[in-house]
Amino acid sequence: MAGLGAGMAHAQEKPKGTIPDKPFKIGHMTFFTGAGAVLGEPMYKGNLLAADEINEKGGLLGKRKIEILKADEAAGTDANTKEMRRLKLSEKIDMFMGITSSGNTPALGPVAEELKLLTIFVDGCTDFLFDKAVPNPRYIFRITNIQSADGSTCALGVAMTWPEIKKVAHIHPDYSYGRNCFDHFSIVTKKVLPKAENVSEAWPKLFSTDFTPHITKTLGAKPDLLVTSLWGGDYVAFYKQALQHGLFNKMKVATTLALGSAPQSIGKDHPDGVLSGVHSNYHFTYPGGNRWPLNKTFVEKYHAKFNEYPNFQAEGAYTATYALKTAVEKANKLMGGWPDDDAIISQLEGMMIPGPGGYVYIRPDNHQGYKDAITGFSKQVPEYPFPILDPTRIITIPIRNITAPPGWPKGEPTSTYTWIDQTWPTVKTA
Amino acid sequence: MSAVALRPAATRSPLWIVVWAVPIAAILAVLPWVMDPYRTIQLAYGLIFAIAGLGFNILLGYTGLLSFGHSAYFGVGAYAVAFMVKYLHVQSMELFLIGTIVASLLVTALFGYVCVRYTRIFFSILTLALSQVLWSLAFKFFWVTGGTDGLRVPTPKLLGVATAESEDKIQFLSHSYYYYVLALFVGCVAVMWLIVHSPFGKALQAIRDNETRARFVGIRIRRYRFVAFLVSGVFTAIAGALWVPLNGLTTPDALVWTFSGEIVFMSVLGGFRNFTGPIVGAVVYNYLKDFAVGFTVYWQTVMGVVLVALVLALPTGIVGTAKLLAALARRRFAP
Amino acid sequence: MDILVIHLFNALLYASVLFLIAGGLSLIYGVMRIVNLAHGNLFALGAFITASAVGQWFAGSTSVWLYLLLPLGAFGAAAIGAILEPTLLRPFYRRPEEYQLLVTFGILMILEDVMRFVWGPYPVSATTLFQQMGSMTVGDWIYPRYNLLVIAIGGLAAIFLWAFIYRTNFGILLRATSQDMRRASALGVNVNLVYVQAFTIGCFMAGLGGAIIVPSQSAVLGMGVDALVLSFIVVVVGGLGSLEGALVGAVIVGLLRETAISLFPELELAVLYLIAAIVLLVRPAGLFGRAT
């Protein structure tokens, strides 16, 4: 069958040595309830799809079937810490995967290291994790793009499309993701759109449902552009309320994560032409057609199994599961038998793996996955009951252009921020 | 509060407590060598919440004031440790505890001054509202408190001895740290025992049982309530300080009002009219909740049903009901 | 200038919903001396029931029918309240009032899960009415008409409630029971009946708050707990047990929130807690309340 499996192991070779056949347990924690679920729950589905595909062929190395134990991230950071411990010490999971919220990875990363638990975080993309919380990771990895890419991608998208804007308004959820997007949008804009200035800010609490005052405040400031990092259920509530205030007619709107939720959560009423971020990672319509067959088969299989379309979380979890499989196979080829965590880790470090969204490189120094960033413009099309990224206006940015290189010293608020500040030239304007 | 009248424990010989306490302490001391690390860490959490419950119950069981905002003091303890790490680069657990006691005295003095002017439902609501104020401050001032991301607390030095880089943290938590917590638990139990059996403790119970009569006897009601409030807050803050290294992180979740509700739940579960009630309640609650969370996604229903059933049918809690049954058994089988 | 009008509308919108929730809480306390910690979840239930009715079960119906269905959440919440009071709350009237806090806390936990069980983990929305009513022009801006409907309903509810309590016989019974339960009972008032009716009305109000706001937002798990905290701030400011206090408190909170978001965006919610803290330190009974 086509798919990542065929792309990875060149053929189904027999594994070396004896492999135990007890199941390989993955603990998967993401938002299964609440407003975060429209973003988080597809992550589990991506993991499940990959696991089922691998299990159809007998499991990892043909012998160990993958078993997934679910945990709900909505329980809160403290409860999640306890649950990770319980999963490892009591349920004896072999690996941990998941996490949507940036509030949780800095808390759980150190705990995973303490527990010596092999972990691939799918999201929870905050720079803080590898900048400060766990600067020398051993057991933990993260597969989707680092958070600072979001604000930068959005800013560059704005600069390419609407270079004439002068007045910028902001609405960001009041937690680390919102602040990170604001910071990086601002520093990039300082360099590439030096004439632009902030005229309004609003910081609603994450998972609010009423954005009316923030919308009114933004309208009152009469900006040219609104930048927002609202996501999931928040973004849905926001855009529906904003439509009734005519906000989209009065200004351009740029987002970092609008189309990153499960696609069906956004309706047919969403306006076209909004710069719609996908967490800099992936939208299922790109690459389209036969241009990148891995994506075509992934989307088809996901849709067939779950009757919906995948988002970047699903793609991330799917790729992460295959990264695990590849690492296990390579380690086994070198050493025989079931590879221990150290062997798997050494194979993951420096791995370059093709996923449905493109090539992902796992940098060995900080265990962070890097892939080219994309964003685009929302467009309603007859084929789908929700908006997609306009295939004629996709913007891709090489990831090395917007994230700090290996060896760049850690900085405040992030190393990418200081790198942009210190190394990027300021665009000269007439 | 007019609840079921139980024979006050003071009429028993003080040696009675030793009969129970020594074997239990011995068992607790041996457990890490017998149980797996996960269960030992669970028990450490239980002992910590037992200290919080002890603190809480001097207000409820002995003074008759139901505080629905005790998460505030727990959080003060937790954040005191985190701030000492962040701003003073302290690593010693002992210094953490001293800092916690100081910080909690300040906060409880302020809150207590406001709250003890009132009683009953109004007191409860005030405590709840004040704890939410603290929560919102922790949430909003993210450049100080780390906001929802919280503040990291690395492994502390116990008694000046740092854990080696190579030592397994789980091993540390389930052995060295467990014993530290156990020692403090025993200490807190002893101190609280002395407090409630002292004239001060007796005065509190008099105030609880009949405020007017207590006033006529000459007890300064508000002052005694205030001191009880202080003691209560400090004990709970100590629990908070001990709790942080277990998680390695403190977030505003430690201050949220539903956590206060859990503290109340624990004491009621064990039986708030008994000294040992909150201890038993905290340990049982901890296991019960972990079991429920692992068992079903509808664990809140499980806990809610337990609480409602408890208050309906067994208002004296586990220990209270056990004593009742023991008394009945004695009467049945007495000559 | 007209932007100020819009800000005022926003504040009144928020205040309308808060008044309904906090008013219900205050009413229940005033008559029965119970602080219903599960009150926020009745607001949430009202939201979910209406969202299901308007957004799912009868979606696509004519708008007239949808408008009539709007209060369904309120009636649903009232029905649940009418069941809860005699079964789970009445056994505690003879008990110390602290037990009531515990029972309502337990009910809060159970109701959270009931909502998850019945409606699943995802938010439920019902935006048809919100969109259908369209927007009207206010100076340079457009404003959703539906928000004005919510403000109107809030205002009407306040008037009806006032009339009900001060101009009807039942209101007299309610006030008598709230002032002195024993004497009212001695005079022949069926206190149990008054209690269940008061509780039902309080739940109706909370459910109505949820029902009318859900078309412009959505019903999300956890909204009940958030709402309870906000309604607590309102009763702290306005005074527990007082309907005028709930109204004034709600308006103050609505105005403060709007001002904070406009002028001090970093503070937002913290401003509300700060006001609560100040009121608690200076006048703990609130503006219109009387402390025990």
Image (spheres, coloured by chain):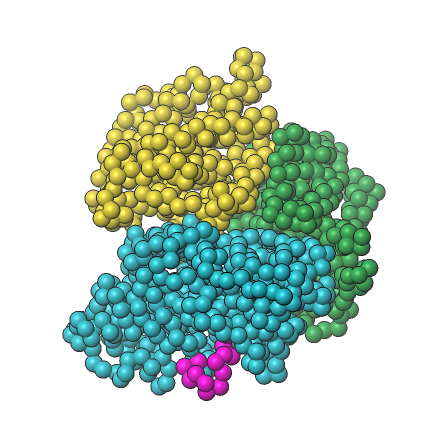
Which secondary structure class fits the magenta region best? loop
Give the number of marks: 0
Lateral position of residue C127 relative to residue A323, left or right: right
Furthest residue toward left: A17
Is residue A285 shown in magenta?
A: yes
Furthest residue toward right: C167
Q: Which chain identifier belongs to the green chain?
A: C
* Chain B colour in the picture: yellow
Instruction: Name the residue rendered at 55%, 52% in the picture.
Output: A174
Q: Which chain identifier belongs to the cyan chain?
A: A
Is residue A159 shown in magenta?
A: no
Instruction: Name the residue rendered at 59%, 74% in the picture.
Output: A377
In this orientation, does residue A96 appear?
A: no
Q: Quadrant of the C terminus of chain B?
A: top left
Compared to residue A40, the image places residue B9 above or below, namely: above
Residue B306, horizontal then vertical, whole percent = 46, 47
Compared to residue A135, the image places residue A270 above or below, namely: below
Residue A138 or residue C203, whichever sits in front: A138
Residue A2, horizontal then vertical, whole percent = 37, 85
Instruction: Name the residue rendered at 52%, 50% in the picture.
Output: C109
Residue A269, horizontal then vertical, whole percent = 66, 72
Instruction: Name the residue rendered at 56%, 25% in the picture.
Output: B113
Residue B49 or residue B108, whichever sits in front: B108
Query: Which quadrant would residue A325 be assigned to in this image?
Result: bottom left
Residue C149, horizontal then vertical, whole percent = 77, 58
Range covered by the magenta-colored residues:
A283-295
